[in-house]
Image: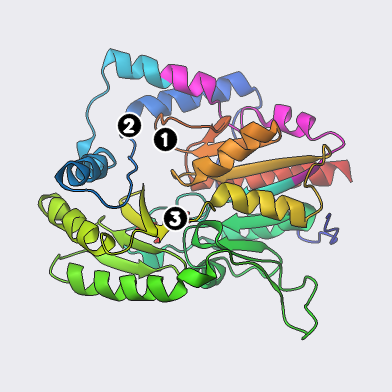
Amino acid sequence: MTITVAVSNPTLFSLAVPKPPPDSTGYITILRKKFLKKLETSGGGGGGGGGGAKINAWVDSMRASSPTHKSAASLTETQDQNSWIIHHPSALGMFEQITNASNGKQIVIFMDYDGTLSPIVEDPDRAFMTNEMRDAVRDVAKYFPTAIVSGRCRAKVCNFVRLSELYYAGSHGMDIKGPAKGPKNKKGNQAVLCQPAREFLPMIDEVYKALIEKTKSIPGAKVEHNKFCISVHFRCVDEKKWTVLAEQVRTVLSGYPKLRLTQGRKVLEIRPTIKWDKGNAIEFLLESLGYANAKDVLPVYIGDDRTDEDAFKVLRNRGQGFGILVSKTPKETNASYSLQEPSEVMYFLQRLVEWKRSLL
Ligand SMILES: O=P(O)(O)OC[C@H]1O[C@H](O[C@H]2O[C@H](CO)[C@@H](O)[C@H](O)[C@H]2O)[C@H](O)[C@@H](O)[C@@H]1O
């Protein structure tokens, strides 16, 4: 599906982000230098259930994802960072390679929300994206089918993004809906395209209430209802309380073997055990767009978190398109390229639009 709306606002290209030098190697060198300034370790995952050993593993993983554990980069770390950026070069530096690969193909854009389109902030309810970013996403969607794939509840992410022309996959892809202007169902409503975990709704409500009650004694802990999944935030919890919080979550989850736990950026994510993740969501969306087994499509997925790896893996296994990890620090990833932060994501989107317009 190609959306061909005429473009009328050239002022959108008055960029707030400085343009990188035209030569990509130079830009990668600048990125590498910036890279060396900061060191942050990556987060860890985990499974539901288990006892003391499991709790220790959770807490180790929670600690590993903490920026309070930054340290000066050793020589080995510096070498690792250099090697990482060489293996996952900037998508800005590789821009031409990306557009060349799209020759004769339809680019489809998938993007995560938190940490990708909006900066990470302490209060999840205030993770707003800038108007400039919104303009960039709106423009991209004029030329390429565009989907937001988030761990958040779909309604919440729709409220943040406020662009009705996009596809939205909330709850880690377990709640997918097409553009408001898309085809309607027989009753004249916008059809919900996919909700594979509907049967879990009552259980999720129950666990949400139990978690609120259980964790209320921990200052800073925040439980977020994401419709088909739940997030327990510990960004604002004193590290000394993390073990207690993890234990509380484990206690609640022990009564629900059909739920599992994963970890994102300072967040424990509880979701159904069904085999459905962001990877399945992008396969579903590609199929809905008519690109199930197609060769003439180039999916590009941009994300910053562990759950985005499921989508990167799908692209890798399909041998199609590119995963782009948003990260300032080396992380184990299935993505091909990297961008450092949301402002670079915005610049990448703006360049895509600029490139597409130059072809028309
Ligand atoms: O798949 P995503 O869209 O990246 O969702 C993952 C989680 O994102 C949100 O939490 C993260 O962003 C918050 C706001 O910047 C930050 O406070 C938190 O520490 C991050 O983990 C969202 O609130 C969660 O529900 C999602 O699970």
Three-letter amino acid code of the residue under disc 1: Lys
Q: Identify residue for label 3.
A: 273
Q: Identify residue for label 1.
A: 328
Q: Do the residues labelled 2 and 3 touch (CB within 8 Å)?
A: no
Q: Quadrant of the N terminus?
A: bottom right
Q: Choose mark 1 or mark 3, whichever is in front.
A: 3
Where is residue 13? Give x, y as percent. Answer: 68, 50
Neighbor class of circle 2 (other Cα within 10 Å; few <14, some 14-19, many 20+) is few
Q: Identify residue for label 2.
A: 38
Ligand 1 occupies quarter: bottom left
Report the coloring of the rendering.
rainbow
Three-letter amino acid code of the residue under disc 2: Lys
Give me the disc on residue 245. Answer: none
Q: In this view, does 258 lie to the left or right of 136?
A: left
Which residue is found at the position 32% from the left and 72% from the top?
208
Which residue is found at the position 57% from the left and 38% from the top?
312
Instruction: Work out whether 76 lies above or below 107.
Output: above
Q: Are marks 2 and 1 in contact (CB under 8 Å)?
A: yes
